[in-house]
Image (cartoon, grey):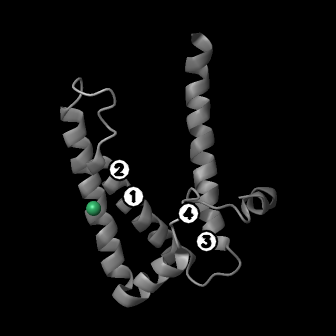
């Protein structure tokens, strides 16, 4: 990681800006139930999202957008909440945002890699 990239990531919000994603409340839940329970919740919620997506896929061809089901939306919200809690766990009390920046840099690299995979395909059309 070069210094410029680290500096560029400072202050970057990793999770999309959902107004209801209140870090204070999420931190209170982490304090109340502890990191292991919250990680188990993330694993459970990811499994529920998986199941919701599989249900939605079965409806393919029956609805205009088979993935836009109430069940998928609910489980996606659960996963986003739990992912933010995991991010808060990783960040901890790190006021330098070093850990947050490390996640942000990973996201940056992966999205750029995705872009480079997509662009040659789009240019061929
Ligand atoms: Mg759920």
Binning the other alpha carbons within 10 Å of mark 4 as few (below 14), some (14 to 19) or many (20 upward) gives few
Judged from the image, the secondary structure of the residue bearing numbered disc 4 is: loop
Residue contact between numbered discs 4 and 1, judged by CB atoms under 8 Å: no
User: Where's residue 84, x and y in %?
Assistant: 48, 67
Which of the marked residues, 2 or 3, is nearer the chain's N terminus? Answer: 2
- 118 versus 48 height, above or below: above
Judged from the image, the secondary structure of the residue bearing numbered disc 2 is: helix
**Quadrant position of residue 125:** top right
The answer for how far apart the CA atoms under marks 4 and 2 are is: 16 Å
- Give the residue number, with chain letter if any, for mark 1: 77
The answer for how far apart the CA atoms under marks 3 and 4 are is: 23 Å
Quarter occupied by the N terminus: bottom right
Residue contact between numbered discs 1 and 2, judged by CB atoms under 8 Å: yes
Residue 24 or residue 20, whichever sits in front: 20
Instruction: Please name which of the two marks, 3 or 4, marks the residue nearer to the observer.
Output: 4
The answer for how far apart the CA atoms under marks 1 and 2 are is: 6 Å
The answer for how far apart the CA atoms under marks 2 and 3 are is: 29 Å
User: Where's residue 46, x and y in %?
Assistant: 30, 57
- Give the residue number, with chain letter if any, for mark 2: 73
Residue at (29, 33) in percent of width and height: 66
């Amino acid at each position: 990681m070069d210094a410029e990239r680290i500096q560029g990531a400072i202050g970057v919000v990793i999770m999309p800006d959902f107004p209801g994603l209140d870090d204070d409340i999420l931190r209170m839940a982490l304090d109340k139930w502890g990191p292991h329970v919250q990680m188990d919740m993330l694993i459970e919620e990811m499994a529920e999202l998986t199941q919701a997506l599989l249900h939605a896929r079965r409806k393919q061809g029956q609805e205009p957008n088979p993935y836009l089901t109430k069940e998928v939306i609910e489980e996606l919200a659960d996963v986003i909440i739990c992912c933010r809690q995991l991010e808060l766990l990783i960040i901890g009390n790190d006021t330098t945002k070093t850990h947050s920046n490390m996640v942000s840099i990973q996201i940056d690299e992966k999205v750029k890699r995705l872009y480079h995979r997509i662009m040659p395909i789009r240019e061929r059309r």
